[in-house]
Amino acid sequence: MADSQTTIASLRGLNSKLTLEITELRKKYAKVKAENIKLKQIIEENTKFKTRFEKQDRKNKTDIANLISKNTKLKSRVLKLEQKLPQNNEEKGNLIAKLDNTAFYKMNFDNTSEQIKDISNNISNPDIYQESIQYSESLICTISKSSENKEIKTISNKIRERNQEKKH
């Protein structure tokens, strides 16, 4: 009997020892389970972030491609405008020169016959001669001012058109 009692006592000791181990293992299991839950949440968040990142990356690439395309178009428009600018300046200069020449020749042509007729009158009537000179000077000023106004209007219109093109 003594043997069975020692066996029972040793089994009880072993049982309590195993019970303690089971309790410790259950605690460890609960910790591992909690960590697994946290890791699953982290994995889900990472997956969401990765999806959002990939979506944003695709959007950024399309936006960059669109911006590059727009930039290329704008560069070509600027290049065309820069090429037209010297032509416009030349045309403007030619136009001004033509207007000045036309006004000069018109005045000279109109006044030549009158000047020939009036040479003798000018000598005898110096007051009338002085008035005709003043009239000619005011006519020249008026013609040059009107050509300047036309030039200013055309340049203003071109600037407005360019500003409107920039807006669109």
Image: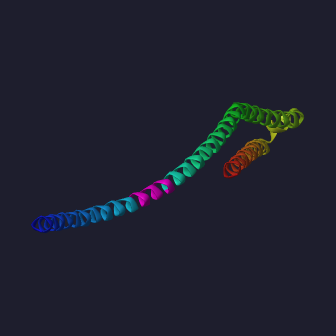
167 or 53, which is in the foreground?
53
Q: In the shown orientation, is residue 85 left or right of residue 114?
A: left
Which percent across, then down, holds residue 4?
Answer: 15, 66
Which percent across, then down, holds residue 107?
Answer: 83, 37
* Residue furthest to the front: 1
Magenta-span inclusion, residue 46 = yes
111 or 154, which is in the foreground?
154
Which percent across, then down, holds residue 56?
Answer: 55, 51
Please tell me whether the stretch drawn in magenta is mainly helix, strand or loop. Answer: helix
Q: In the shown orientation, is residue 14 left or right of residue 76?
A: left
Q: Residue at x 55, y 47 (%)?
A: 57
How is the structure coloured here? Answer: rainbow
* Residue furthest to the left: 2
Q: Quadrant of residue 127?
A: top right
Q: Quadrant of residue 75?
A: top right
35 or 98, which is in the foreground?
35
Magenta-span inclusion, residue 47 = yes
Which percent across, then down, holds residue 2?
Answer: 9, 67
Quarter of the rendering occupied by the N terminus: bottom left
86 vs 50: above or below:
above
132 or 139, which is in the foreground?
139
28 vs 144: above or below:
below
Q: How many marks?
A: 0
Q: Which residues are magenta?
A: 39-48
118 vs 48: above or below:
above
